[in-house]
């Protein structure tokens, strides 16, 4: 797909399950070094039941992804939720609710419960949720800089001390640095409900790591399928960004050739725009996806029968 819009050099390196099989670890030093030396990184899904385990000392595929985010200094995950006009009726929600939905989910990536200290004893377990002021400040700035009209900050200050810190810092950053952008706060449970009853209300949603993981997957279903959702993970601009589909590896359909490739295709478009600064090329891919969908392209997750190869060829045909 990328080769259809420009000339690029590609390298392939293992991460996740394939790296565990080959090297006994989900992320090798060699793969991390190669990613650091690249202009951008396009990542495939990393997991599968083969590597599922409850042994805390055993390597897990997800450690490869988390290691890449940390090793590349990536702290902001951007997930655009845009409903293609051709897929309005593929959404599980009514047309009058979802039509015109276009929002950006901004998820903090390096703090919170994912990276906090983890303890396990015979009769109990704990995961520390930790955030610093600096971590909240920098993700808030990403959200405000991305907003057209409104930033919705999602937290849980009625229960969590990290939620109270989050709300205080986001409020301060908004008032001091972005006075022309409207800021609203929503509890995570309220936001989860509002995504289903009034998704057009949202412009930019910013939230912490765990809440962002859950809410962005929920929001993805507004588009008809998780197979339509791309993402970008970005840092301070000093190194490469990481671009990946938001879905998992779908082991239940592995080898059948029916997986929806469009989230990966759209992630490649984000790579062009956010990673390489190639706006025209990114727009061309996105327009080709919309055009292919308008012709009736539907993979099984969208209620059709197109194979992975057929979907890919349909987009390439529109590009041509």
Image: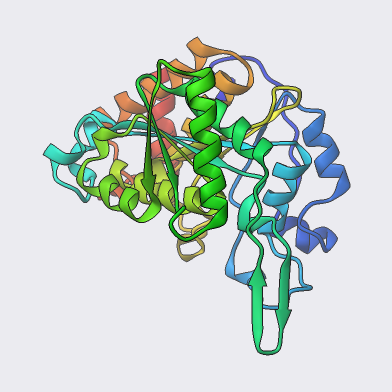
Front residue (pair 41, 18): 41
Please determine whether, in this image, residue 257 is positioned above or below residue 238: below
Please determine whether, in this image, residue 206 is positioned above or below residue 240: below
Position of 28 compared to 81: left or right? right
Q: x and y percent of residue 33 in the render?
A: 85, 37
Position of 299 compared to 320: left or right? left
Q: x and y percent of residue 235 in the render?
A: 68, 30
Give the colour scheme of this rendering.
rainbow
Front residue (pair 262, 94): 94
Q: x and y percent of residue 150 in the render?
A: 36, 26
* Occupied quadrant, residue 310: top left
Residue, x 75% and y 36% (percent of image)?
A: 72
Front residue (pair 81, 25): 81
* Number of residue marks: 0
Residue 289 visible from this viewpoint = yes
Q: Which residue is farthest bottom? A: 123
Quadrant showing the C terminus = top left
Residue 268 visible from this viewpoint = no
Residue, x 24% and y 37% (percent of image)?
A: 87
Please determine whether, in this image, residue 145 is positioned above or below residue 15: above
Q: x and y percent of residue 236 in the render?
A: 69, 26
Front residue (pair 24, 55): 55
Residue, x 71% and y 68% (percent of image)?
A: 118
Position of 315 compared to 11: left or right? left
């Amino acid at each position: 797909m990328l080769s259809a819009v420009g000339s690029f050099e590609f390298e392939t390196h293992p991460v996740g399950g394939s790296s565990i099989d080959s090297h006994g670890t989900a992320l090798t030093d060699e793969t991390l070094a190669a990613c650091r030396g690249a202009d951008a990184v396009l990542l495939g899904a990393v997991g599968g039941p083969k590597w599922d385990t409850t042994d805390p000392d055993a390597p897990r595929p997800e450690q490869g992804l988390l290691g890449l985010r940390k090793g590349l200094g990536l702290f902001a995950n951007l997930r655009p939720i845009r409903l293609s006009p051709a897929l309005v009726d593929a959404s599980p929600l009514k047309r009058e609710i979802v039509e015109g939905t276009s929002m950006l989910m901004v998820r903090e990536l390096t703090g919170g419960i994912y990276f906090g200290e983890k303890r396990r004893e015979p009769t109990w377990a704990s995961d520390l949720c930790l955030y610093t002021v600096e971590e909240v400040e920098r993700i808030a700035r990403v959200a405000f800089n991305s907003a057209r009209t409104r930033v919705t900050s999602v937290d849980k200050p009625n229960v969590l001390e990290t939620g109270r810190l989050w709300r205080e810092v986001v409020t301060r950053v908004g008032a001091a640095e972005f006075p022309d952008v409207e800021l609203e706060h929503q509890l995570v449970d309220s936001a989860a409900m509002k995504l289903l009853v009034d998704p057009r209300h949202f412009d930019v949603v910013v939230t912490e790591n765990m809440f962002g993981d859950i809410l962005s997957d929920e929001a993805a279903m507004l588009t008809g399928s998780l197979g339509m959702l791309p993402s970008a993970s970005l840092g301070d601009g000093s190194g490469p960004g990481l671009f990946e589909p938001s879905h998992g590896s779908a082991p239940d359909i592995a080898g059948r050739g029916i997986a929806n490739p469009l989230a990966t295709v759209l992630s490649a478009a984000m790579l062009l725009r956010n990673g390489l600064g190639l706006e025209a090329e990114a727009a061309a891919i996105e327009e080709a996806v919309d055009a292919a969908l308008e012709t009736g392209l539907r993979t099984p997750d969208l209620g059709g029968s197109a194979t992975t190869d057929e979907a890919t060829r349909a987009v390439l045909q529109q590009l041509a």
